[in-house]
Structure formats: structure tokens, C-alpha cells
Image (cartoon, rainbow, N blue to C red):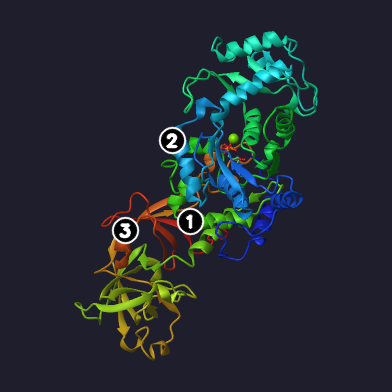
Amino acid sequence: MPKPPPHAAAATSDATAAAAPAGSETGGVSHGTNFIRNIIEDDLRTGRHGGRVATRFPPEPNGYLHIGHAKSICLNFGVARAYGGVCHMRFDDTNPAKEETEYVESILDSVRWMGFDWGEHLYYASDYFDQLYAYAELLVERGDAYVDSQSAEQIRAARGTLTEPGQDSPFRGRSVAENLDLLRRMKAGEFPDGAHVLRLKMDMRSPNINLRDPVIYRIRHHEHHRTGKRWVIYPLYDYTHAISDALEKITHSICTLEFEDHRPLYDWCVENLPVPYRPYQYEFARLNLTYAVLSKRRLIELVELGHVDGWDDPRMPTLVGVRRRGYTPEGMQLFCERIGVSKADSWIDMSVLEQAIRDDLEPRAPRAAVVLDPLKLVIDNFPADLREPCTAPVHPHRPELGRREFALTRELWIEREDFAEQPPKGYFRLSPGAEVRLRYAYVVRCTGCEKDADGRVTVVHCEYLPDTRSGTPGADAKKVKGNIHWVSAVDGVPAEVRLYDRLFAVPHPGAGDRDYKLDLNPQSRTVIRAWCEPGLAAAQPEQRFQFERHGYFVADRYDCRPGALVFNRAVTLKDSWTKR
Ligand code: ATP
Ligand code: MG
């Protein structure tokens, strides 16, 4: 992860300014342009790949996907969709020690959830182990690769630096016959881990360190999640990746900028081996998101140290996490579209993501009244046994969605902050003598309150004004500035509500050499008991709502059940962070 650049804030506001209009209907395909699209369009024009577009998304199955991967998914699957091509789903599973089937399943599930489909194109680099090995023997026979028997430390020490050339290995001059014999015995399992490696014979004096005789095979006596115990030597990433792309006839191999210096090696592999295709690599800037960490190593640590409740904790920047948080795939796509694709490293502010989620949810989330911090309101002139029917639109701008029904009763729940015994200046809600509208019902005049021994308000009293009922002729003649939501204390249903906030309290967790865990936000989760309008009793897992005046919430995927409602806050209605 790059350190925050000095102009991080400026880069951030650029991204905000470049935001596309809200809610554009794209079906997950950006209509915008970027340099990758320009390259593809040029290639389509010139017929470089015979009019084909084939990309791939190549995660290593060593963790769960995160929001950074979403950018890569939208780009790779998005261009394939936009140009009538294909995007291959490929697991880069060359490191047996760190990979697990659990991760494979979750990654596939997350890509599908994002709205993309690889069709029949599901591949594993491990499917190519035989072919990769055959090419390795060919390289040895041609004198382009040799077995090095130095230790890992010796190899590292002899590699040189950016300013100093490397030094040839004493084993570099081994004969083809000796190299072939050693490679075959490596494969046969005759040597322990680390005894030998296979290296390309390139140039130890190259200014590009990646070309100083890169290692392409190492010994690893470790069971592989797919090939079991069949192999004890495993190919390295650069070699594997280039050849996998070529075998799958990928046209545009799109990766993040840190691979730019690896491109000459990529090109060497696809140009010097008898592979069936010549793919090209292009690099783009990876996503860096403020108030988050997007490295698998750190995410694993957060899970293992118990700072979060698991990979799908709604505070995690994983795709399973944001899903549980109530974010939608369309919202994630909108975000990816807005941040665009470029070659310049920059930071995207978390507020850009949060705004995309709001913009996606606003037009479709049904509304609901929920009181998060309940205070009892008694309408003293309202009959105790009356339940007066009220209705409200499911969505204020979409009448076709119909109306919600609930009843007004003498005793209600209101938000504690909607009453002030001594109102500050400009406070237009309830206070003794003041009038407010109870949404979708009457205007009420506050008559006073009761308090407990500690002086805490326990009940607020009011009287309703009979001619002010919402929706009846002349009701609006009564002008009031405040308009508060409420839930009947008779019919309201209780719920556990988990108020999630940003996982980190600072924009650049771990900036400098600080331990990023010290930057965790201690208030990232607050669990409360709330009262909901009766209709929410039927909420289905993953159903999303706008709780009026509060924000967007989702019925928890796993914990929400009839009779035991659980909602997670996805995002507040407005950006409250910039004011902190
Ligand atoms: P991490 O650094 O989190 O371990 P990684 O790059 O090792 O991630 P891979 O599983 O190898 O993770 O990534 C799969 C694909 O996703 C790669 O093409 C990689 O370039 C891309 N990718 C990973 N992180 C980001 C990011 N932050 N922004 C954009 N693309 C990313
Ligand atoms: Mg990787």
C-alpha cells in the first residue's frame, strides 16, 4: 500500500468532483471512458485481436475479496460486457501454503453477488501445472533456465539493488543435462524445501531487478487444495500468470500498477515460449480508500485478533462485509464507475463510497418509521382505546409502490432528541408550549413532561389539534416548523439495531510507521433497542429500508427473524463525518 501522498486530500476531492450524476442506470457497465477502454477500442478498430476481447479476474484464494477487488471486477467484467467479450474467472492458486477452498467458494459467491458471470470460463492456474512444467523443461533444454542451489538468503544478497548490479550465481554455468536432471529430481521430491530453485537465465546486470534471473520454480512440500500431493514444486506468479493468460487466449491482461516493472518478464514469457496466444498486459492504479485498510494481510489480522466478528462483519471492507452492511451490488458498481480508472495512484475518500450507496438506495428503499432512542409521548386528549388509522407512502416519489398503514394511539414513542425542556435557539421540535406535526397525523402542542429522581425526562405530554390531520382538507392551514416521526407504543415492534460506523477513526490508518490497529474507531458499532412501525415485523433478511430521518438499514442476513428483528445501519442519510 502506498503511503498517503502529500496531496491526498486534493486527489480525494478530484474524485468527488468527477462523480457522475446520481442513480444512472448502467446495468453494471460504465458508459464512461478510460484509458483501458481507449486501448480496447483501438485494438477493435485495428483488428489486433481479431475483434475479440477476453479479460480475466485472477484472485489468489488466500483471503476474502475486498472493495479494491470490486474495482478490478467491475473493470475486467465490465469491459468484457461492454465490448461483447468474455471475462475469465481464474484462481491464481500457485502457493499451496496459503490457499483454502473456503476462500474459493467465497470469492465465486462475491463475484456473482457483484452481478457478474464468467459463464463456462472458470479456471485455476493449478490446471496448467503440467503445461507450465513442460515449458520449464523446454527452457532448460534451450539453455534459458538453470537450477540454482544457493540458499534464499544468498540469492537475495546477490540480486543487487536499484543502483548496484546483481552477481551471477556460481551455479549459472551448469550444463543442460545437469539442470534437466536436477529439475526432474526436484519434481520427483528428492530434495527438501529450499534446496534448489529454477531460474530464468536473463541478465543479472539488468536495471530492472525483475529481470535478474527471476526464480520460476521452487520446492514446496505442501498439499495443494486441488492437486493434493501430486506436486512438490510450484511455479511462481510472474511465470504462471503470463503463461495462463496465453493459454486462455486473453487479449487484455489488466493488473495493478505494482506489476508495471514485471511487464518485461511477462512479455518475455509469452514471446519466448511456444504458447498459443500473445496477450498484452496493462496496468491501472489500485484503489486506496480512506478510513479503511485494503490489504489481505491486515484484514486477516483484524479477524484473527478479534477486532471484528469475522470476514463478514458489517464493518469490514470485504465484499461479504459490505453486503451484510446493506450495501448493494449496484451501489458498488456505481462507486466503481464514479472513481474511474486511471494510471495515477490516488486516495478515494470513504464519503464517495457512502454517497454512491445512498444514491443507489434512495430511489428504491421503502421508507419506515423507527425510533432509535425512545421517549414516551402521551396525547392526553386522545382516547385511550382509540386506534386511528394512518397511512404514509412506501416511497415519497414512487406512488406506484403504494402506502404503509399503521395506527395512531394515545401513547407513542418519539426520539428523545425530539424533545427539549429548554429548547436551544432554532429548535423547532417539542418543548413546553411548542407545536409540531406528528408525521402523517396531527399537529400536537406540548404541555409538559415528567422526570425521574435524576431529572431525566421519562414522559412527554401533549394535546392534539383536531382539525390538523394530515391529508384532510385544510389540515395544512396550521403551519408548524417541526415534523417528527413516531411509532405507536401499542403496535410498535421492537428490534435490535446495530449502528455501524467507519471501522477506522482516521483517514490513513497506520500512516507513518504507526500500528494501524491503534487507529481503529472505538465507536464503530453501537447496539441499541429500537421501536419500529408494525409493518417492519415482516422484514425479510437482506431487505433494505430507509428509516425516516435516520438513514439506510438492512435486515441482517443471518440474525433477523420474525419476532427477533435485527437491522444493520448501512449509511446515515447525510455525511456526518465531514462535520466531526
Ligand atoms: P492484497 O494486496 O489485498 O493481498 P492482491 O493484489 O494480492 O491483494 P489478488 O487476489 O492477487 O490480491 O488480486 C486479484 C486481482 O485484484 C488482481 O488483479 C489485483 O490487481 C486486483 N486488486 C487487488 N487489490 C486491488 C485494489 N486495491 N484495487 C484494485 N485492484 C485490486
Ligand atoms: Mg496478489
Q: Residue at x 65, y 21 (%)?
A: 136
Whether pointer 2 and pointer 1 mark residues with C-beta atoms closer than 8 Å, the reply is no
Q: Residue at x 33, y 89 (%)?
A: 467
Tag 2 residue: 102
Q: Residue at x 41, y 67 (%)?
A: 366
| Residue 26 visible in this rendered orientation of the protein | yes
Up-down relation of residue 294 to residue 74 (above or below):
above
Mark 1 crowd level (few <14, some 14–19, many ≥20, 10 Å Cα): many
Whether pointer 1 and pointer 3 mark residues with C-beta atoms closer than 8 Å, the reply is no
Q: Quadrant of ligand 2?
A: top right
Mark 3 crowd level (few <14, some 14–19, many ≥20, 10 Å Cα): many
Q: Secondary structure at mark 3?
A: strand
| Residue 289 visible in this rendered orientation of the protein | no
> Residue 148, position in %: x, y?
68, 13
Q: Which of 296 and 524 lies nearest the eye of the viewer?
A: 296
Image depth: mark 1 or mark 3 in front: 1
Where the C terminus falls, by quadrant? bottom right
Q: Is ligand 1 within 8 Å of the beta carbon of the residue shown at mark 2? A: no
- Label 2 or label 1, whichever comes before in sequence order: 2
- Label 1 or label 3, whichever comes before in sequence order: 1
In the picture as drawn, the residue positioned furthest to the left comes out as 385
Whether pointer 2 and pointer 3 mark residues with C-beta atoms closer than 8 Å, the reply is no
Up-down relation of residue 97 to residue 61 (above or below):
above
Separation of residues labelled 1 and 3 (CA atoms): 22 Å
Q: Tell me: 355 left or right of 31.
A: left
Separation of residues labelled 2 and 3 (CA atoms): 32 Å
Q: Quadrant of residue 267?
A: top right
Tag 3 residue: 495
Q: Secondary structure at mark 2?
A: helix
Report the amino acid beneath label 1: Thr
> Residue 121, position in %: x, y?
54, 41
Tag 1 residue: 328
